[in-house]
Image (spheres, helix red, strand yellow):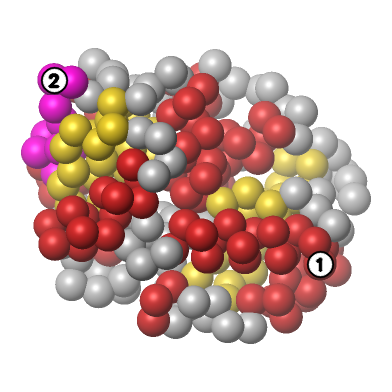
């Protein structure tokens, strides 16, 4: 439903309650004629989302054209399958297209032609290698390297400094990687993407940037968003 400010599209954005990063990062990427209307939901152990349907129903009252889920779920066993099922359920109930941080990231990598990738996460080595890496590879990618900031809790992810983020990208980078994928929607990377691409000389797919890129492009909006890497600049 268009209005004077959202005359191209209105995006409804569903964000985990503790996540302080998705909303400001998507705001940085906004193009003229598109508005982001946000709502927050509970995130429970195992990345479960109890009550999200009720939150969505309230968000629907502002007339969004699409729903964006600020979630990547590779850190939970079966997380990607659960995320796909959640997106399908919300799409069926809302009648709207639903985009997710995880699946948008894989679409972005495919659009860039990257098959061998390095991965950056907010998680520790054990979770990265035992849970995250197998789920990423099940999407058809070869993970040549993976590294994380080892945040002690979901709430602590957003506290990573610029130096910590640069360091984990440097650890993850690998000569065989055709792109670097960043997972974890609470890890603040979007405003660093252009500098990271310059430093490592390869595409950086930050999950929040990929989420907005897919929502824009699949909604028919072709505006280039400069300053945040090659994905959104194309």
Q: Position of residue 78 (x, y in %)?
A: 42, 64
CB under 8 Å between discs 2 and 1: no
Specify few, some or many for label 2: CA neighbours under 10 Å numbering under 14, 14-19, or 20 or more: few
Count the marks.
2
Work out whether residue 223 can be spotted. yes
200 or 172: which is nearer to us? 172
**Image: 171 above or below 133:** above
Specify few, some or many for label 1: CA neighbours under 10 Å numbering under 14, 14-19, or 20 or more: few
Specify the quadrant of the image occupied by residue 94.
Answer: bottom right
Q: Position of residue 111 (x, y in %)?
A: 51, 22
Residue 174 sits inside the magenta stretch = yes
Task: Name the residue carrying label 1.
Answer: 93
The residue shown at (44%, 82%) is 44
The residue shown at (18%, 20%) is 176
Residues rendered magenta in the picture: 168-176
89 or 189: which is nearer to us? 89
226 or 201: which is nearer to us? 201
Specify the quadrant of the image occupied by residue 77.
Answer: bottom left
Q: For numbered disc 1, what is the local secondary structure? A: helix
Q: Position of residue 70 (x, y in %)?
A: 52, 57
**Which mark is drawn over residue 227?**
none
Work out whether residue 21 can be spotted. no
Cα distance in 3D space between marks 2 and 1: 45 Å
**Image: 102 above or below 173:** below
User: Of marks 2 and 1, which one's residue comes earlier in the chain?
Assistant: 1
Task: Name the residue carrying label 2.
Answer: 175
């Amino acid at each position: 439903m268009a209005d004077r400010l959202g005359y191209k599209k209105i995006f409804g954005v569903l964000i985990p309650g503790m996540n302080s990063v998705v909303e400001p990062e998507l705001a940085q990427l906004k193009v003229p004629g598109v508005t982001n209307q946000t709502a927050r939901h509970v995130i429970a152990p195992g990345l479960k989302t109890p009550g999200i349907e009720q939150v969505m129903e309230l968000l629907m009252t502002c007339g969004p054209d699409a729903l964006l889920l600020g979630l990547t779920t590779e850190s939970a066993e079966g997380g990607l399958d659960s995320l796909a099922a959640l997106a399908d359920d919300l799409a069926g109930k809302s009648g709207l297209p639903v985009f997710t941080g995880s699946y948008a990231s894989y679409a972005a990598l495919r659009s860039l032609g990257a098959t061998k990738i390095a991965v950056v996460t907010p998680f520790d080595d054990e979770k990265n290698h035992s849970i995250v890496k197998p789920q990423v590879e099940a999407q058809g990618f070869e993970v040549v390297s993976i590294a994380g900031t080892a945040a002690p809790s979901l709430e602590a992810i957003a506290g990573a400094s610029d130096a910590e983020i640069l360091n984990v990208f440097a650890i993850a980078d690998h000569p065989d990687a055709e792109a670097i994928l960043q997972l974890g929607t609470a890890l603040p990377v979007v405003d660093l993407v252009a500098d990271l691409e310059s430093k490592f000389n390869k595409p950086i797919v930050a999950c929040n940037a990929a989420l907005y890129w897919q929502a824009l492009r699949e909604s028919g909006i072709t505006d280039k968003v400069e300053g945040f890497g090659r994905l959104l600049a194309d």
